[in-house]
Image (cartoon, rainbow, N blue to C red):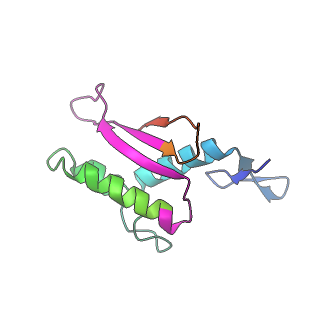
Amino acid sequence: MASFTAFPLRFRDAFLRRTEEVEAIVQLFRVMAVTPHGSWAGCAHFGWRDFFERARVRPELISKAVEEANSALRDLGITHYRVAAITKAGDSQRDIDSYEVSIISTEAGAEAIRLQL
């Protein structure tokens, strides 16, 4: 059974804490949501924060966020997941927008993951 590095990075018994694959993907996307786009030297496509902050006045940026997320996944070698859609959540408050991210696995029979941000 494969295990994956958990975020945030923490040690457990002198080793990095591990988690299941789906939880690792969810944690990765949560980190991506709060990271400024292009601020991580390891992957120029990583980060959604800027897209979410400006989407209220430029809604087309959400489709760009989907493209950049999928590019980031490819750059990181994560080929069996992709972002299918990002939609504005219906429960968004007047001053705070929230989004739902639909993540799909390319493996047959896998269920979609819905992440609320």
Residue that lies at the very extreme toward the top in this rendered image: 91
Report the residue at 18% width, 44% height from top: 56
Q: Is residue 85 visible?
A: yes
| Residue 17 position within the rendered picture, expressed as x and y whole percent measured from the top left | 74, 51
Report the residue at 42% width, 51% height from top: 34
Q: Is residue 92 magenta?
A: yes
Q: Horizontally, is 53 left or right of 31 in the view? A: left
| Residue 101 position within the rendered picture, expressed as x and y whole percent measured from the top left | 40, 40
Residue that lies at the very extreme toward the front in this rendered image: 108
Report the residue at 30% width, 38% height from top: 87
What segment is highlighted magenta in the picture? 74-103
Q: Horizontally, is 113 left or right of 45 in the view? A: right
Q: Is residue 47 visible?
A: no
Report the residue at 40% width, 56% height from top: 69
Residue that lies at the very extreme toward the bottom in this rendered image: 41
Q: Is residue 37 above or below residue 65?
A: below
Counting the numbered discs, the total is: 0
| Residue 3 position within the rendered picture, expressed as x and y whole percent measured from the top left | 74, 50
| Residue 104 position within the rendered picture, expressed as x and y whole percent measured from the top left | 49, 43
Q: Quadrant of the C terminus?
A: top left
Camera-nearest residue between 63 and 27:
63
Q: Is residue 32 magenta?
A: no
Residue that lies at the very extreme toward the left in this rendered image: 57
